Image (cartoon, rainbow, N blue to C red):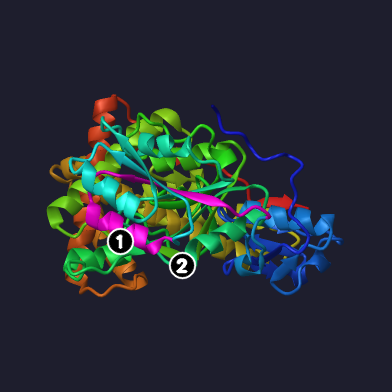
Amino acid sequence: MTATGPRSSATLPLGFEVELDRETRILDGGRTLLGGSPIRLLRLGERARPLLAGRTLKVRDRSGAVLADRLLETGMAHPVVRSLPTPSDPRYTFVVPVRDRPRELARLLGSIDANSPVIVVDDASRGRVVIEELAKQYGARFVGLDTNVGPAEARNIGLRLVTTPYVVFVDSDVVLAPETIPTLLRHFADPRVGLAVPRITGLATSASGNWIGRYEQARSSLDLGARPARVQPGTLVSWASTACALARTDALRGGFDGTMRVGEDVDLTWRVVKDGWRIRYEPTVSAAHEHRVRVGDWARRKAVYGTGADPLAQRHPEFIAPAVFAPWSAAFVVALLAQRRWSVPVAGAVYGVAAVRIAGRLRGTERPARLAVSLTSMGAFSALTQTSALLTRHWWPATVVGASVSRRVRRAALVAAVSDVVLEYWRADVDLDPVRYGFARRLDDLAYGAGVWWSAAKGRSTTALRPHLNSGSRGEGR
């Protein structure tokens, strides 16, 4: 079976309310909006301007539905989720893949409403009897597999048994808050939403107070941050974890790729997007995940995440790039990396030309030059942070080789490694001193990057290692 996309005629219902993202700017007395991910300019026509009341828009007619849909599509606005109704048929079924972990499974099942249907798919546990008894104790349907097939195919087996309009995938090492699923369910008032996910936070346990546990609380690979977002490749939130995810059953007819042991959640979300569905990330509700906190287990898991790079590159080569640059920002970075006498003047010239070109595209807005400088600075900063990640994370084996023969590479790597830690530590809400945070950050990057390179070597492809050049589009009208 293949996934089916939303009906092209589907529109937002009357009463649907959206609010502009906190980074979206209202310019020119309400005639222009600037924001989204990637950032763009949206000019509002005479009929569209009055539809915005301050920073919110409530759908009252077709024109409002069209504008609200456009704002959601560009990431300029997000649903005011608590104002939305639940679907007319709000029934959902939990699908829980598990292999051993009886303590964790009992904890999860205890956090699920007793009236909710649950399917526990046992993926060839060594202690199968214990898992089956737990499922029966909590009133869940038990499906036992004799062969280990991996979490993706285990979820598929559970999905085939679901008869409700919605399905909740949740991993056994997660604990759900009571409001999480009911809140996510409200997102489906938008007929184009196929999947909604909460923020994945760290579960407090007796072991999670060590330095790795505190680092994971602030920098977990599964935590997508505090800002709501439309999940879309090439944006600030480019994928979503299915450690906890609520989906329309009709949007998942193809299910997960059962051949993938890692990265299957990324693959699923990208296929759902390709099929025309929207995916919402809702950080006002959360699912608590028991992170790995032993250094060896934690580092191995980070490396495993990296090994998903080449399989994803084979399936989605257009989405997998470790960095995306505009041509001018690539030239800006290359000039600085050269570390010659001419580097700063050339980088400055590139910056200036880019600012002038952007100002030309902003003609007709208030203070286009000032706005262009702001946008160009944001682009330059993004290019530098992405380059830092390439040097210290995705390309670190090449960086090590280069540093062994080049003083310039050593300087670039040192600046990247230190500045990355300083910026991330300053932004993160972390209960950890900067030295241990920095050490964990570098271990994180080394493990993940090693997994990416192993994956690329195994697949005999550099697709997952190659940045993309993208000229993009900065202006739109309506």
Dot 1 crowding, Cα within 10 Å, few <14, some 14–19, many 20+:
some
Q: Are marks 2 and 1 in contact (CB under 8 Å)?
A: no
Q: Position of residue 167 (x, y in %)?
A: 51, 47
Q: Would residue 294 be visible to someone looking at this image?
A: yes
Residue kind at label 1, given as amino acid type: Arg
Task: Name the outermost residue toward the right.
Answer: 47
Residue drawn where x is 14% and y is 42% of the image: 405
Tell me where residue 140 appears, x and y as whole percent.
39, 50
Residue 6 appears at what percent x and percent y?
A: 66, 40
Between 349 and 233, the one nearer to me in the picture: 233
Residue 178's tag is 2
Q: Is residue 101 magenta?
A: yes
SS at mark 2 in the image: loop
Q: Which mark is residue 107?
A: 1
What is the crowding at mark 2: few (fewer than 14 residues within 10 Å), some, or many (at least 20)? some
Q: Is 124 displayed left or right of 20 in the figure?
A: left
Quarter-of-image position of residue 371 = bottom right
Span colored in magenta = 88-112
Q: CA distance from mark 2 to mark 1?
A: 14 Å
Which of these two is toward me, 277 or 363?
A: 277
Q: Is residue 409 visible?
A: no
Is 214 placed above or below 338 here? Answer: below
The amino acid type found where label 2 is placed reads Pro
Q: Position of residue 142 (x, y in %)?
A: 36, 43
- Quadrant of image for the N terminus: top right
Task: Give the image quarter of residue 182.
Answer: bottom right
Residue located 16% across and 40% down the image: 401
* Foreground of the two, 336 or 438: 438
Q: Is residue 275 left or right of residue 114?
A: right
